Amino acid sequence: MTVFPLIVLFSLIGGAFSIIGGLLLLYREDIARKLSIYLLSFAAGTLLAVAFLDLLPEALEALLDQGAEPAGIFMAAIGGFLLFFLVEGLLFQLHHHHAAEDDDHCKDTHVSKAPTLLVVGDTLHNLVDGIAITSAFLISIPTGIGTAIAVAAHEIPQEIGDFSVMIHAGWKRKEIILWNLLPALATTVGAIITFLLRDKIEFILGYLLAGTAGIFIYIAASDLLPELYHVSRRDQLKKTIPLLFLGIIVMAIGITLAE
């Protein structure tokens, strides 16, 4: 199998996982609520492992092969980190700030607009995921597969939260499913566009991988890990923290075997 079918296949898998968690919430809310915190912990581990053990080393190797300064990977990683910080802030945090006001109209506006913002944010997020998956596959198939797995792993708990917001806003089940298909397909769209432009972006693949690592680190450090302490009781942490390390170990073994 050539690399392009693999890119399409794994980008579709990543996109599919972006709605699996939400569908589970729609049909079995009790199970989804119980599983989400454990999936969150495992996903954080996979993201950190892929970022530090796979993407950054591959980015360094790619830049060295091109004769570029290795310090560039750190700048690109910081850039990816800050990019998602700004995107999340512009799409969500500023809006949440207004929602915290006492005015009832602001609260109603937050409830009605939040799902729309989530759709926009998820679409952009998944486009970046698609770019990341293809960039990784263009370096090596094992790196691409590892990146796709990390993308899929963190999508399930994220979408459980997103679907919860839509349900709270009064959206109907069919509307929720329909409006989450667009972001899901965005992963494959981003992957295909990146593949078609591969000859023009080949010289920046190392930077793209490093930027992806920065994004993964941001998602794990600012979204997933803090959530573990926010929603977990002390006794639950004894169950969730091992899954964090399990995610790291599983990905580390997979990366090692693929080399």
Image: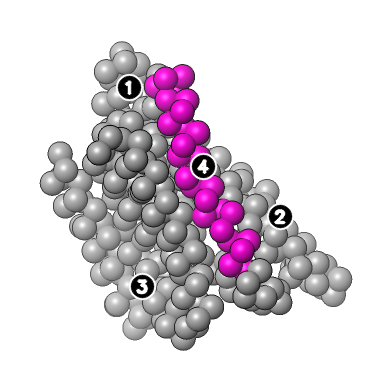
Q: Which contiguous range is marked in magenta? A: 176-202
Position in image of residue 187 (x %, y %): 49, 47
Q: Residue at x 31, y 13 (%)?
A: 67
Identity of the amino acid at label 4? Val
Tag on residue 38? 3
Classify 141 as above or below 116. Answer: above
Identity of the amino acid at label 2? Leu
Q: Residue at x 36, y 48 (%)?
A: 10
Identity of the amino acid at label 1? Leu
- Kindly identify which residue carries mark 2: 94
Task: Tell me the CA gap for discs 1 and 2.
Answer: 37 Å
Tag on residue 146? none
Is residue 14 among what the camera can see? yes
Tag on residue 63? 1
Is 48 or 33 nearer to us in this picture? 33
Identity of the amino acid at label 3? Tyr
**146 relative to 112 in the view: left or right:** left
Task: Tell me the CA gap for discs 1 and 4.
Answer: 27 Å
Task: Tell me the CA gap for discs 3 and 4.
Answer: 30 Å
Q: Nearer the viewer, mark 4 or mark 2?
A: 4
